[in-house]
Amino acid sequence: MSAAVVLPRSAAEDMVAESGPLSHLRVDELRRYGEELDAIREEILADRGTRDRRYILRLIGTQRALALGSRLAMLAACAFHPWLALPWASMSAFLVVLGLGTLGLALAKILENMEIGHNILHAQWDWMGDPEVRSDRWEWDHVCPASQWRHSHNVVHHMWTNVMGRDRDVGYGMLRVTERQRWSPFYAIQPLSFLVMMALFEWFIALHDIEVAHVWSGKRSWDEARPLVRDGLRKVGRQVLKDYVLWPVLAGPFFLWVLGANFVANVLRNVWTFIIIFCGHFPAGVHHFAKGSVEGETRGHWYARQMLGSCNIDGGRLFHVMSGNLSHQIEHHLFPDLPSNRYPEIAPRVRTIAARYGIDYNTGSLRRQFGTTVAKVLRFTLPGPVPAAH
């Protein structure tokens, strides 16, 4: 699950774990903290069964029905438009049905990307033995190939969460979100970069594993990047063909209307995904770490780093499902391979453990988490000092 190494008990257990947010903990306390979280993980792994299987299979069925129904609604609006009696009523009805189809398709894409695809690709459902719902076979409705996302997200980001110089998700190479990032003139335009990334988020994710900046600077060879670019272009081609050619062609003379509706659905999905992900990683109070602080990292320390580097979002059951349960980003980073439908039930236990050991558990409303994230983006647009890392 992680790169953490469980070290043997030593005479150093009475020493302070480290400086910074964990300085109040002795090493033996950090070890017990990790053991308590391990116990939760093992309990859920042993308890997976019929209700979990029913949850994901029903959700996949619901999502597919919603996607197909929404696309058919778009085509129905186009098919019946010429036959409605009054011109004004015709256009009004057309726009209403097309709008509903667009919104439904956006919701279907959100469900597929967030609660279904993201979590399947984390191997949360491999235990079922279902050949369709496997992390190594699922290809999601996204321009980023699943295999590339599994590497950049599962391996790099989850292993090195918020470790400066190792976790490439800190600002995604475009944004300065912490004072630990040295300022450059490029960050002066980051309010605009923020908005562009929000609207086109899936396209930036598609470039993430290629590391375009490193290829451009020569830090990564073109020979290494070429297969990633080739596979990425193939996936982009399939997505563009589906959303912007085949479905619009079925609309006949309303080709451009359906093409536009598909584009709007994708943008809505991108905006929602962006907001949820940024609220899980960049709000006020989140911690970042120097490379040296993770040398010889124990499992308890790894757990603590995941908790300090992640943020939850308060909300109801529907909100959690539509967020892919990444509203429980802390639980997801602690246990990325547990079924996402279990995060709400273990969150209170995780929070209690955090309080017992005095480790920050960052949670708040969507308004608070996104508001403080935006404030950070605006603040770090300007140059500022870089403090010593802990």
Image (cartoon, helix red, strand yellow):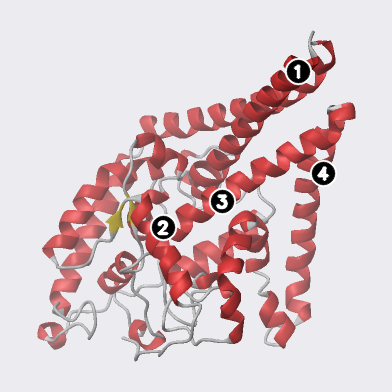
Residue 370, disc: 2
Q: Earlier in the sequence, mark 4 or mark 2?
A: 4
Q: Amino acid at mark 2?
A: Phe
Q: Amino acid at mark 4?
A: Leu
Q: Residue at x 14, y 78 (%)?
A: 24
Task: Answer with left or right where residue 304 lies relative to residue 140.
Answer: left
Q: What is the secondary structure assignment of the residue under circle 4? A: helix
**Mark closer to the observer (3, 4):** 3
Name the spot of residue 34 as percent of width and height, x first.
23, 66
Disc 1 from disc 2: Cα separation:
40 Å
CB atoms at circles 2 and 3 under 8 Å apart? Answer: no
Q: Earlier in the sequence, mark 1 or mark 2?
A: 1
Q: Which mark is residue 271?
A: 3
Q: Residues within 10 Å of mark 3 (few under 14, many from 20)?
A: some
**How far apart in space, not on screen, are marks 4 and 2 (Cα)?**
34 Å
Looking at this view, is 317 or 94 the one in front?
94
Q: Nearer the viewer, residue 218 or 172?
A: 172
User: How far, Cα to Cα, is label 1 from label 3?
Assistant: 32 Å
Judge left or right: residue 8 versus residue 57: left
Q: Is residue 131 left or right of residue 290?
A: right
Secondary structure at numbered mark 3: helix
Q: Residue 351's image quarter?
A: bottom left
